[in-house]
Amino acid sequence: MLLTKIARSWSLSQTRYYCIPGMILLVLGLLAGCGKKETTTKKTPSAQPVTAATATAKNVELFYDTLGMAVASESVDISSQVSGQIMTSPFTQGSMVQKGDLLFEIYKPPYEASLLEAKGSLAQAEAELEINQLNVDRNRSLVPQKLISEQDFQAMQATVKENLAAIETARGQVLSAEVNLGYTDIISPINGMVGIYNVNVGNIVTGMDGTTLTTVQKMDPMYIDFILPVPKFAELRKYFDEANQSLNIRAAYLSDPSKSREAPMTILGNEVSDQTGTVNLRATMKNPDGFFWPNQPVSVRVFLKELKDSVLVPSAAVSTGQSGQFVFVIGDGNTVTQTSVTVGQKQDDGNVVIYKGVKKGDKVVTDGQLMIRTGSKVKITKLDGKATSAATTSSTTSTSSDSGKTDSKQGS
C-alpha cells in the first residue's frame, strides 16, 4: 500500500511539470493568430486590370439598312414586226448602242415589191380622178342648156368622189408598204447596252409573234429599287416630310461594301403589298460608267437624319443586365460606377450612340467588366486602343503596395 501511494504522487507531479510549458505555447499561439487576422482584414484589394475608352462626340447619321436591286431605267425587248429571214445583225453582243443603230435586217425584196405595187395603184387612182374631174368640168355648163341631164351630171360627180376615195385607199397602201419596209431594219429605240443574240442570222422570224431577238437596257441613269416593312415606312415618311421630300440613299456591292454610291430617293411606294407587308421604294442613280449592272443585288442604306454632337462609345463597353443596358464609368481614383444608359444606333466603326447616361470625355470600361462592380478599383492597361505607359502602371501598383503596408502597420 505504501508503494502504491508513492507511485501515484510521483505521477501527479510529472503531469503538472509537462502541462505548464504547453499552456504557455498555447497562449503565445493565440496572440500571434490574433495579430495576423487583424493585418489581413485591413489589407487593400489590388486594382483589377481593364481596358478603357474615352467617350467622344460628333455628328452621325440616323439610317436604316435594307436590301435592294439595281434596275435598268429603260429595258426594251427587241422583236420583229414583219416576217422574213434575218439577213444581218451588225451589232456586237454586250456593246453600247445608240438610239437608231441597226440591230437586225430582214430580207427586203418582198416588202420593196409591195411598196412598188402600192405606189402603182395610187398613180392609177390619181389618173382616173384627173380624167373624171375634167369630164365634170366640161359638162357643168351644159346642164343649164339641157344638153345633158341633171342625173348624168350627178353621176359624173359621184365618180369623182369615188376616185378621191380610191386615192386615199391607195395612199394608205403606200404608207403601209413603206412602214413594213421600214420594219425590215430593226433599230434600237433607246441608248443602252444590247444583250446577246437570241435568234441568229439566217433564221426565219414571224412578225408580231413575241419572239425576243435581243434586249437593250438603258444603263444611265440606273434605278435602285428596295423595300421597307410597313412600320419602318411610317418612320421613313416622317423623316421624308421633315427633309422637304429629299432623302438620300447609299447603294453598295454585297461583296464589297466599299464600292458604293449615293443617290436621291425619287419615288415613295403607293401601296402596301398584301403578301409581304412591305412597300416598294426607288432611287435614281447616275451610272455613266456602268458601275452598277441591271438586276445586281445591292445593300441599301437610307439616311433619315443627321444627329448633332452624338456621344459615342465602343459597343463592347455596353453590357446588359436585369435592369437594362449599362456601362462602367471610371471616375476619380480609378473607381468605377455602373451607370444605366440609353443606347442608339451602332455605327460602321464599331461605336454606338449613347443618348443618355454618358457624356463626352467619360472613360468607360471596354474589357474586364465581369471582374468589377460599383466601387471597384481598376488599373487601365489600354486606353483608346493604346497601351498605357509603364510609369502610370508602376505608380498605380506602388500606390496599392504602400496602402497595403500602411494597413499592415495599423493592424500590428
Image (cartoon, helix red, strand yellow):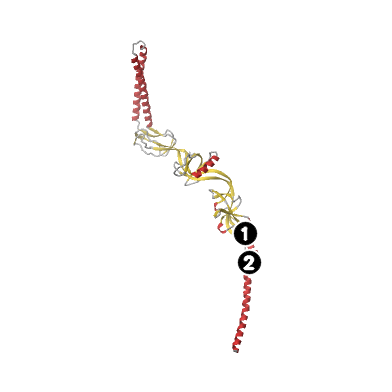
Q: Is residue 216 above or below residue 173?
A: below
Q: Which mark is residue 83?
A: none
The reply, left or right, for residue 180 in relation to residue 315 is left
Residue 313 x/y as whole percent: 57, 51
Question: Is disc 1 placed on a helix, strand or loop?
Answer: helix
Q: SS for tag 2? A: helix
- In the foreground, 293 or 163: 163
Q: Earlier in the sequence, mark 2 or mark 1?
A: 2
Residue 394, x across and y down, in percent: 61, 59
Kind of residue at disc 2: Thr
The residue positioned 37% from the left and 28% from the top of the image is 176
**In the image, is residue 56 above or below residue 118?**
below
Tell me which corner region of the image, top left, top right, bottom left or bottom right, holds residue 4: bottom right
Does residue 201 appear to the left or right of 351 in the view shown? left
**Badge count:** 2
In the current view of this chain or complex, which residue is farthest to the top?
145
Report the disc number at residue 39: 2
Q: Nearer the viewer, mark 2 or mark 1?
A: 2
Residue 291 visible in image: no
Mark 2 Cα shell of 10 Å, populated few (<14), some (14-19), many (≥20): some
Could you say where residue 325 lies in the image, as x and y percent from the top left?
A: 55, 53
Amino acid identity at mark 1: Thr
Mark carried by residue 396: 1
Which image quarter holds the C terminus?
bottom right
Q: Residues within 10 Å of mark 1 (few under 14, many from 20)?
A: some
- What residue is at 63 percent from the left and 78 percent from the top? 21
Q: Are marks 2 and 1 in contact (CB under 8 Å)?
A: no
- Judge left or right: residue 125 versus residue 331: left
